[in-house]
Image: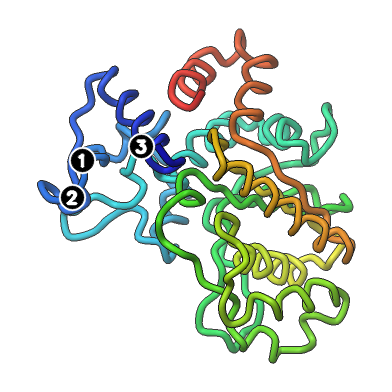
Amino acid sequence: MNGHQYILAKQTEWAKNIGLNLIGSRGDRGRHVYTTDLDYNLFQPLLPDVKKSFLEGDGGELGELGLPGKMQALHSSSALAVNVFQYWKSIGAVHLIAAACGLCRQGSVVSQNIQFERKSPINDGFGFHPNIDVVIHNDSNTKYKMFAIECKFSEAYGAYSHGGLKQKYLDCTKIWDDIPNLRAFAKTITPDDSDFKHLHPAQLVKHILAMKRAVGRNGFRLLYLWYDVLGEQAQCHKEEITTFKKVAESDGIKFHSLTYQHLIVSLAEQFRSEHADYIRYLTGRYL
């Protein structure tokens, strides 16, 4: 069983255990791994501004024409991100999840808000702007103005290959002025990426370029938050993350990675009594 199959099996069993009926991506057609209602796949319903962000995003997360959206999939990375992060936004305690992610020290209160699916321009002339899964906005007086988080669940272990970086990014020379090592790396994945099987480095490069434009090279941290599995795929994934981390850090980019399992265990150790329902949901579903 590969990583993708393992995650699907685990999530399907979770759904059966709580009595959820499942449907396919086209209703009766497709593998039955989608909830009949979005709220059934979430710890709490989407907050109004969170829902607005997903409606304005490019991923088709909320569905259309009566068909389930991507976020209704049990293995949806956006649903997982919402289940982990939205709760802290809803209770006005964003600083606690930021610290749990290792993005700031324990006790720091600089983190103020969480935004999902943030459109982040790299060049105004490009027709498409990257969507960053989760962005934590900090006090304007702090060194790091934003914490950007790329969230992965099952897609790192799927059968579909990912694309490389388009030549137009390399042609826009000014955006690389202070990150020469990342530019050299970007050339190796342009226009195709045949070296990385599980990590999608072109996506991370675009996030760095977007954040660098927004707040400068030293104004953000980038976290790669991913779901770990057993076996060869996971080991390869870890090695690819390490390779990319070395390149990013060689240009002074604050990049690090964390598994969802590590984060959830850390949250449980700190907050089991104060936030019991939230911890019970995350540990029961994702550990």
Which mark, residue 32? 1
User: Residue at image x 79%, y 48%?
Assistant: 139
Depth check, front residue: 260 or 272: 260
The location of residue 95, given as percent across then percent down, is 73, 34
Q: Is residue 182 above or below residue 271?
A: below
| Left or right: where 15 falls relative to 48 | left
**Whole-number angstrom distance, CA of label 1 to CA of label 3:** 10 Å
Q: Which amino acid does the dot numbered 3 rest on?
A: Leu
Check contact, mark 1 vs mark 3: CB within 8 A: no
| Left or right: where 159 falls relative to 139 | left
Q: Which amino acid does the dot numbered 1 rest on?
A: His
**Whole-number angstrom distance, CA of label 2 to CA of label 1:** 6 Å
Q: Which amino acid does the dot numbered 2 rest on?
A: Gly
Depth check, front residue: 60 or 158: 158
Which mark, residue 30? 2
Which element type, helix, strand or loop, lies under badge 2?
A: loop
